[in-house]
Image: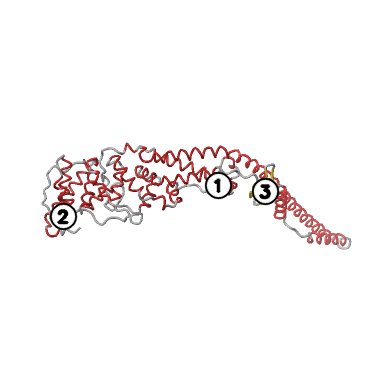
């Protein structure tokens, strides 16, 4: 701002004091303070005549003279001040069409969006300037060809931030590990993502924005500081514009704003505009997802069951892979045990003691104890062998049952394919229709 306000500090203080009262009244009830402006003009400073022009507009008088004076001193600031002040007061329909273009300036993918542009964007999205204001912002964004420079995955992540990593279809509910196999996961993941994408677009376009487009002012009822750039942004930018607040908060790129606007919980008015911009991206994504959902299910498949890879065929599990798995189960389940040499030695020693008992009766008891201990060891060894055999048999039987069940699950998955493809086609068609409706749907 080129004007040196220190040349007339009292006049500058007066205009700032009145501007502060004016903004407070605009946010409260959409009107100017009851007393007329009690300040003098500051030569070269755009704000005094801009305030006079605004008061004249609000009172229904002719604002041409002060408006010409303010625009001659600082055209863009004057236009931004009037557009935002009228939006805050709920009288945005009174702006002149040229003011919006002058205040907004030019958008660029290479430069951050200014706070003034974002506040006009927000006010127009909320209907402050009627349908024409919303169309103005849409055309500004369309002219940038954002989809040509965008990463589709970023936009999907913004719309569906909590997307599950694995989708388990009903046919594989008993075999969730099969749902992670790429040949089976890709169609179901695509169909599930397409359904969630359709639901998110329906949520955005069906928001009853008309309820929010009331003449109530865009106020700062929470009393947030000027650096909190949320729904109070138009008022915060006004305060900064007329010198009533500190430094502005950080600015963001167009893509950052659009991605934030698409996230769940964002302002529905902003989300509708962001969805319009993302339309070409989402249509391309929908086509790819629909094509993936129509992929033919495999007729044969190798699946992991109990840690073994079993090849499944339509007629049943492959016997060769089953035999290999059974051999591995036997090798892992049977613990190799050496011959019971200790028990044999105890038996030999016990027999010897019994023979020697004819000459030394005390040896008889020792012989019986040795033979008994040897028998207990052999019994224990047999129990371990039988336990190993039972474990192996149970594992083999479970493997066969799982393999048979997996074959039937694969058949059920194939039967679901037609239903899944039809649903995906419906979702893609509806998603395209919702995108075409755009922000005007509300």
**Left or right: 440 as drawn, with respect to 416:** left
Residue 88: give x, y in percent of width and height. Answer: 24, 44
Give the labeled residue for mark 1: 186
Q: Nearer the viewer, residue 419 or 33?
A: 419
First along the sequence among labels 2 and 3:
2
| C-alpha gap between disc 2 and disc 3 | 83 Å
The C terminus - image quarter:
top left
Q: CA distance from mark 2 to mark 1?
A: 64 Å
User: How many residues crowd around disc 2 within 10 Å: few (fewer than 14), some, or many (20 or more)?
Assistant: many
Residue 70 x/y as whole percent? 17, 51
Which of the labelled discs sits on residue 311, or is there none? 3
334 up-or-down from 290: above or below: below
Q: Secondary structure at mark 1?
A: helix
Q: x%, y% of residue 372?
A: 79, 55
Residue found 43% across the figure and 46% down from its top: 280
Which residue matches tag 2? Answer: 45
Question: Dot 1, crowdedness within 10 Å: few (<14), some or many (≥20)?
Answer: many
Q: Residue at x 30, y 45 (%)?
A: 136
- Name the secondary structure under disc 2: loop
**Toward the viewer: 116 or 232?**
116
Q: Mark 3: give few (<14), some (14-19) or many (20+) Cα within 10 Å.
A: some
**In front: label 3 or label 1:** 1
């Amino acid at each position: 701002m080129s004007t040196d306000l220190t040349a007339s500090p009292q006049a500058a203080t007066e205009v700032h004091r009145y501007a502060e009262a004016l903004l407070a009244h605009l946010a409260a009830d959409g009107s100017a303070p009851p007393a007329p402006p009690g300040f003098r003009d500051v030569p070269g400073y755009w704000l005094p005549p801009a305030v006079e022009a605004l008061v004249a507009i609000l009172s229904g008088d002719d604002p041409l003279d002060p408006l010409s004076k303010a625009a001659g001193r600082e055209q863009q600031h004057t236009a931004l001040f009037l557009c935002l002040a009228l939006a805050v007061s709920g009288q945005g329909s009174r702006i002149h069409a040229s003011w919006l273009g002058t205040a907004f300036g030019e958008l660029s993918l290479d430069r951050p969006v200014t706070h003034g542009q974002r506040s006009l964007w927000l006010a127009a999205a909320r209907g402050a300037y009627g349908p024409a204001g919303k169309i103005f912002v849409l055309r500004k964004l369309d002219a940038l060809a954002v989809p040509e420079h965008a990463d589709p995955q970023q936009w999907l992540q913004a719309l569906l931030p909590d997307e599950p990593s694995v989708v388990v279809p009903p046919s594989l509910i008993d075999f969730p590990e099969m749902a992670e196999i790429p040949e089976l996961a890709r169609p179901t993941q695509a169909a599930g993502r397409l359904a969630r994408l359709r639901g998110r677009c329906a949520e955005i376009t069906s928001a009853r924005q008309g309820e929010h487009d009331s003449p109530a002012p865009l106020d700062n009822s929470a009393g947030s500081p000027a650096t909190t750039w949320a729904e109070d942004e138009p008022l915060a930018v006004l305060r900064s514009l007329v010198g009533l607040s500190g430094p502005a908060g950080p600015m963001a790129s167009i893509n950052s704003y659009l991605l934030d606007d698409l996230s769940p919980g964002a302002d529905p008015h902003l989300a509708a505009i962001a969805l319009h911009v993302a339309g070409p991206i989402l249509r391309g994504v929908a086509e790819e997802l629909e094509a993936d959902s129509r992929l033919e299910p495999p007729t044969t498949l190798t699946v992991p069951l109990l840690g073994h890879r079993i090849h499944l065929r339509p007629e049943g599990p492959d016997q060769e892979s089953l035999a290999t798995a059974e051999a591995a189960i036997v090798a892992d389940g049977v613990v190799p045990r050496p011959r019971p040499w200790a028990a044999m030695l105890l038996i030999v020693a016990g027999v010897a003691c019994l023979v020697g008992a004819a000459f030394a009766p005390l040896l008889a008891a020792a012989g019986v104890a040795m033979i008994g201990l040897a028998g207990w060891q052999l019994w224990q060894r047999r129990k371990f062998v039988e336990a190993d055999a039972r474990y192996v048999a149970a594992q083999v039987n479970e493997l066969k049952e799982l393999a048979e069940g997996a074959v039937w699950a694969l058949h059920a998955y194939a039967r679901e394919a037609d239903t899944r493809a039809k649903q995906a086609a419906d979702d893609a068609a509806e998603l395209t229709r919702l995108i075409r409706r755009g922000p005007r749907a509300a």
